[in-house]
Image (cartoon, helix red, strand yellow):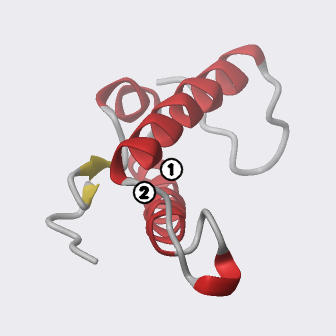
Amino acid sequence: MRVSDQNEVEGIPLVPDPSAARLDERHQQDYRAHRSQLVQWLLAFGKDPETAEGYAHRTVLNTVQRLDIFYRWAWETGRIHDQHQPRRR
């Protein structure tokens, strides 16, 4: 699996600009680590973990893009209530 820099896995962005603008550095690091693990798992095992068959690259890209939109909505509407909720800048 190719992790090209700290903000991409296999060309899939980990912390898109709209999320980066909302998160402080510590939350960006947590979000990047979470999404890196998620992307790697989806590519390697997501479709069928028992046979280690992952989803196609485009499917993973679409999935993580939709998840990022959902996370931002949850942050903005207060739907995520825990100690890791980012503060507005």
Farthest top residue? 77
Residue that mark 1 sits on:
27
Task: Look at 29% across and 49% down and name the residue there.
Answer: 12
**Classed neighbour count for the residue bearing mark 1: other residues with Cα under 10 Å, few (<14), some (14–19), many (≥20):** some
Number of numbered tags placed on the structure image: 2
Residue at the left extreme of this rendering: 4
Residue at image coords 35%, 52%: 57
- For residue 1, which quarter of the picture? bottom left
**Res 57 label:** none
Q: Which three-letter amino acid code belongs to the residue tagged 2?
A: Arg
Is 15 left, or right, of 55 in this rendering? left
Q: Is residue 73 left or right of residue 56?
A: right
* Residue that badge 2 annotates: 32
Callout 1, which amino acid?
His
Q: Is residue 67 above or below residue 74?
A: below
Mark 1 falls on what kind of element? helix
Point out the residue furthest to the bottom here.
51
Q: Is residue 51 left or right of residue 21?
A: right
Query: Disc 2 and disc 1: Cα gap in Å?
Result: 8 Å
